[in-house]
């Protein structure tokens, strides 16, 4: 279902390339919409293939490997991103005056493509991508502590909420876990 959503995004337009990159980042790492909104150009460490996710809600900052499909999506978007802007945020509006997108706008973008692809909404918006990521990680026996770190949870109990999530409703939006190798 999430693949259907991704394939519905036109990657060759300024809006589409931005939206595709934004959704790829959120799907790959399970980050909140606000973390995507606050992602800065300086948080992408191209030479070391890492991505810094800033702390949210009392969590802690995490450094994650920059996955190749995410890097490619970001490069595709950065080719369209306006050059002459004082903003360091990665995701900007595509029409002047260019401004950073906030978490509400990001959630609206996610909802738009979910509707376009006919994906069932479990709370809708960017939270659905976060829950889907957590469920995929849990079903692939990732350590709960590692999942908590990536999700930015200070307390593991918060992460256990995802473990008790309604798997039946999330199965509709879950993507297959990437193969190793």
Image (tube, rainbow, N blue to C red):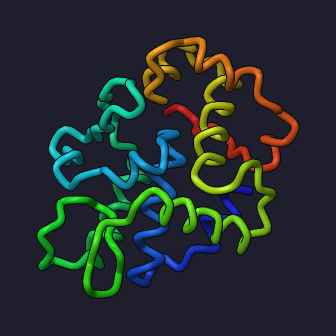
Q: Please tell me which residue is depicted at 50% across the width and 20% down the height of the picture.
A: 148
Q: Nearer the viewer, residue 148 or 136?
A: 148
Image position of 124 with respect to 135: above or below: below
Q: Position of residue 153 (x, y in %)?
A: 47, 22
Question: Residue 52: where, in percent of width, then height?
Answer: 27, 38
Residue at the farthest right position: 168
Residue 160 appears left or right of 31: right
Q: Nearer the viewer, residue 7 or 154?
A: 154
Residue occupying the far bottom of the picture = 96
The residue lying at 61 percent from left, 46 percent from top is 127
Relative to 87, does residue 24 appear above or below in the rendering? above
Q: Nearer the viewer, residue 76 or 101?
A: 101
Residue 125 in percent (x, y) is at 62, 56
Q: Please give the name of the residue rendered at 62% of the width and 31% of the height, measured from the top-left corner.
A: 134
Number of numbered discs on residues? 0
Please, is residue 127 above or below residue 73 in the view?
Answer: above
Instruction: Give the quadrant of residue 5.
Output: bottom right
* Left or right of 92 on screen, residue 181: right
In the image, 23 versus 35, the foreground residue is: 35
Residue at figure coordinates x 82%, y 32% from the top left: 166
In the depicted structure, whether residue 37 falls above or below residue 77: above
The quadrant in which the N terminus is found is bottom right
Image coords of residue 81 (percent x, y) = 27, 75
């Amino acid at each position: 279902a999430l693949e259907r959503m991704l394939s519905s995004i036109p990657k060759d337009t300024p809006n589409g390339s931005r939206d595709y990159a934004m959704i790829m980042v959120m799907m790959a790492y399970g980050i909140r919409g606000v973390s995507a909104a606050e992602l800065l150009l300086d948080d992408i460490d191209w030479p070391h293939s890492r991505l810094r996710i800033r702390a949210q809600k009392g969590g802690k900052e995490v450094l994650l490997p920059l996955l190749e499909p995410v890097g490619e999506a970001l490069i595709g978007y950065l080719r369209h991103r306006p050059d002459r802007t004082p903003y360091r945020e990665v995701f900007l509006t595509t029409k002047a005056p260019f401004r950073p997108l906030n978490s509400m706008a990001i959630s609206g973008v996610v909802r738009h493509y979910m509707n376009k692809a006919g994906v069932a909404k479990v709370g809708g918006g960017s939270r659905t991508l976060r829950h889907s990521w957590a469920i995929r990680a849990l079903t692939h026996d990732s350590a709960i502590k590692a999942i908590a770190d990536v999700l930015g949870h200070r307390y593991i109990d918060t992460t256990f909420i995802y473990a008790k999530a309604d798997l039946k409703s999330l199965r509709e939006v879950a993507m297959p876990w990437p193969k190793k190798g």
